[in-house]
Image: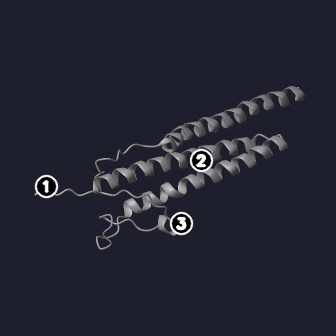
Amino acid sequence: MGESFDMVTKCMSFTLNEQFMEKFVEPGNHNSGIDLLRTYLWRCQFLLPFVSLGLMCFGALIGLCACICRSLYPTIATGILHLLAGLCTLGSVSCYVAGIELLHQKLELPENVSGEFGWSFCLACVSAPLQFMASALFIWAAHTNRKEYTLMKAYRVA
């Protein structure tokens, strides 16, 4: 009559291959069909931070070249790479939230588990606007320096 089911929560780590496995319409039921939306949201939220990191590192190299060469065009490229990195970070956060919401529609949380976002999620939410601000600063600096460089060139000709 008053049966109680005790749920056991266990943390597991997944290998790289397991990160890219298909997600099923009914979690845990391999006969229910593949849920493509959840599968690709999971893959994107796993891959996009690495793409963002790569873009930031490549932008740093180009920024270093801009300092060495004293040229304005690499600064614009650095700004554009920061913008793309910010979009990747924002996309990763969005994919994570959408994937978690879809999972919570399929499964209910146990009683003693709270579904809150952690510190790394908050850090990613702060990171994206900072990348956009860095992008805007690089592009603004290149644009401002180009005007001053053109005025200096015109002054020399005159």
Residue type at tag 2 = Ala
Q: Which residue is mark 1?
A: 2
Cα–Cα gap, marks 2 and 1: 54 Å
Quadrant in the picture for the C terminus: top right
Circle nearer the N terminus (1, 3)? 1
Residue at image position (41%, 62%) is 39
Q: Secondary structure at mark 2?
A: helix
Q: Give the label, 2 or 1, closer to the camera.
A: 1
N-terminal label among 2 and 3: 3
Residue contact between numbered discs 1 and 3, judged by CB atoms under 8 Å: no
> Residue shown at 29%/74% (left/top)?
31
N-terminal of the two: label 2 or label 1? 1
The crowd level at tag 1 (other Cα within 10 Å; few <14, some 14-19, many 20+) is few
**Callout 1 secondary element:** loop
Relative height, residue 85 to residue 141 (above, below)? below
Tell me which corner region of the image, top left, top right, bottom left or bottom right, holds residue 140.
top right
**Residue farthest to the left?**
1
What's the image's color scheme?
A: one colour
User: Quadrant of the image for the N terminus?
Assistant: bottom left
Distance in Å between CA atoms under marks 1 and 3: 42 Å
Gap in Å between the C-alphas at discs 2 and 3? 23 Å
- Where is residue 40 shown, x and y percent of the image? 43, 61
Label 2 sits on residue? 85
Q: Is residue 92 left or right of residue 9?
A: right
Q: Is residue 94 above or below residue 10?
A: above
| Residue 5, x across and y down, in percent | 23, 58
Badge 3, how many Cα within 10 Å: few under 14, some, many 20+?
few
- Residue on which disc 3 sits: 16
Q: Of circles 2 and 3, which is in front?
A: 3
